[in-house]
Amino acid sequence: MRLAVLLATLVATATVLVPGATAENRPGHPVTGVEEDLGYPIAGRVLSQDQSQGVDARGRPQAYWVTAGNDETPAMFQVTDIRSGEVVFGERLPAGVHSWASTFSTAEGAVYFGMTTGELYRWRPGDPAVTALGTPVDGEGIWRLAAAPDGVVYGGTYPGGKLISYDPATGEVTDHGQVLPGETYGRSLVVTDEHVYFGTQPNARLARFDRATGAVTRIHLPAEYAVHEVVYDMTLARDQLFVRVQPSNDLLVYDTATAEFVDIVPGISGRAISPLDPAGEHVYFRIAAHGIVRYHLDTHSWVPIGWGPNAFPGTWAWIDLDDPDFPGESLAMTYYYGRIYVWNPTTGATRYLGESDLEGAPSPVQALGRGPDGAIYVGAFLSPPGMARFDPATGATTVLPSAGQVEGFGTYDDRLVYGRYPHAHLLDYDLDQPWDYGTNPGPAVELGAEQDRPQAFAQVGDRMAVGSVPVSGRLGGALSLWDPATGEVTVHRDVVPDQSVVSLATHRGLLYGGTSVYGGYGIDPVATEAKLFVFDPDTGQVVSAVTPVPGSKAISALTVDRRGWIWGLADRTLFVYHPGANRVIRSAELFGGGSTRYGTERGLVLRGRSAYVATAGSLWHVDTRTWRATELADGGVAHLATDDDGRLYFARGARLYRWTENT
């Protein structure tokens, strides 16, 4: 008891003696500063997560895009005439940022698309504007659409895993309920006159829904796919249903007439499988090592066709280009960066249409970090252009071309490491050499062990410690140790059972980790409180674990002061943990807002007698002697980093900001 009182007294009067402390951040002196808008680090992108193809009233083939927006700018619906390559229609939507659901209704001659926030839209070629059809089911986002031969449009939703339908003849919406118990995503759909085939996530399940009776029949995948995560894509050709599952990307061929799986094609590349060709014999898909291949439905064999576009198929259609070099029908493929590829089976002629005429939107900031070179690095949500480097000395921003979504940054020596979603990839960038994606950084290191989001980093000795969140539908994140010299990765899963590792700090050879009770999307947590744990990397064992803030759901930031005490942020609470006493010696609920899923948008920086905290949409200053909190900026503040001069960087949506304290 006497020790606890002594420690509490010490922290109440402690100053964190870091060079750069000024009079303005001492007790009794208000901290003031200047906020600068540094613009969009990744100024423009074209990203259409789902696409569809159709024709106008004259039979001219068209591609339909819903290009992603951000917190400031809604998504935009755009139409490309594939014959001319022109963008013939575009409209910024009234609501919705992302769409994974688009389908062309041949019966109606209209394209439908749904947003992850639940809005449903329709556009008929020639219409002067998009028609908003409302939100079919409150609280449900739309994640896949498919049109029936009779024109009824079906959708799969999240988080309810529901099947919904919209009848354009009556305007009626029907909620058919959750198709398979416990499955939260309706991820893939095929609709016939009689049935809807429905694929799910977070577990790869397949079901058949009877349109007349509403009866659901489970179609069991082959036994080796029992632990797969998602039925991502489906195409029906004659009686054969082509089903792509993840994470293997195997293509399963199901005969709907005999109710048997008749073939498996391992490891295809890309999303979509083409519709049946005009001859009624083949479908087409991509295999990375072979390019586009032609699959014969009767022999269950495939051959490369000699066409290898450097893109993943997003949607396919057989189209008439009305061009002598493309006689008959040609195969058109769209790619989610706004690109179109066309191939003619008779002449072998190809055509490419780029995305330059499509309108994009700045990429929302997903992660911030300071590199060993003092620059501020910016990762963005599903960013096609890459990540950005901001030079504090010159104010210049450079986009570093790469693929994927950056979840977090770490450093060792003169190198920058970043974690990429999905599949928990680590990429290692040598700052002494020019950026050359594929070479520097080189091939990605994959954590495996069902991990998906590597977001927390700390160097311990010669290794990098990485905290991660698992794939959708799974609990149990991991603490991984990666040796850059050898490439060896050791994954310690469930260091705190059923929790993800979302923040890390290191001191005197030990790792301090903060957890989130949440796992991947699509599964509810079973743990009730986030933990702070101490991990010995030499033994691979958890030394101790405490609950720093009872009831908190995530410890979103950790850092170490000059005394070796661990400062942390847990939901609305700032706390200090004393390693020697193995206990929290001070905590206070200083901030508004609620819990956060993983804490990626929150941050904590110690400097002088100040703690700077980004949480719940605001930037705060906390006097570490009085623990008085002062709001410095609001309006959607997220993420936090600092440069070598002590200036703070944060984001609002897709914009980067800098806050400089007055001296």
Image: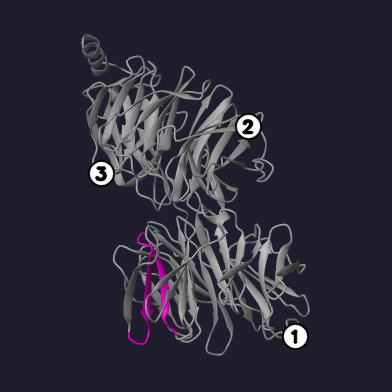
Q: Is residue 152 magenta?
A: yes
Q: Badge 2 local density, few (<14 within 10 Å), some, or many (20+)?
A: few
- Image spot of residue 614 (x, y percent): 34, 38
- Precedes in sequence: disc 2 or disc 1: 1
What label sits on residue 488 in the rendered view? 2
What segment is highlighted magenta in the picture?
151-170
- Precedes in sequence: disc 3 or disc 2: 2
What label sits on residue 324 in the rendered view? 1
The residue under the point 59% across, 54% down is 248
Say what amino acid the circle numbered 2 marks.
Glu
Quadrant position of the C terminus in the picture = top left
- Image spot of residue 215 (x, y percent): 39, 74
CA gap, disc 3 and disc 2: 40 Å
**Residue 242 visible in rendering:** yes
CA gap, disc 3 and disc 1: 63 Å
CA gap, disc 2 and disc 1: 56 Å
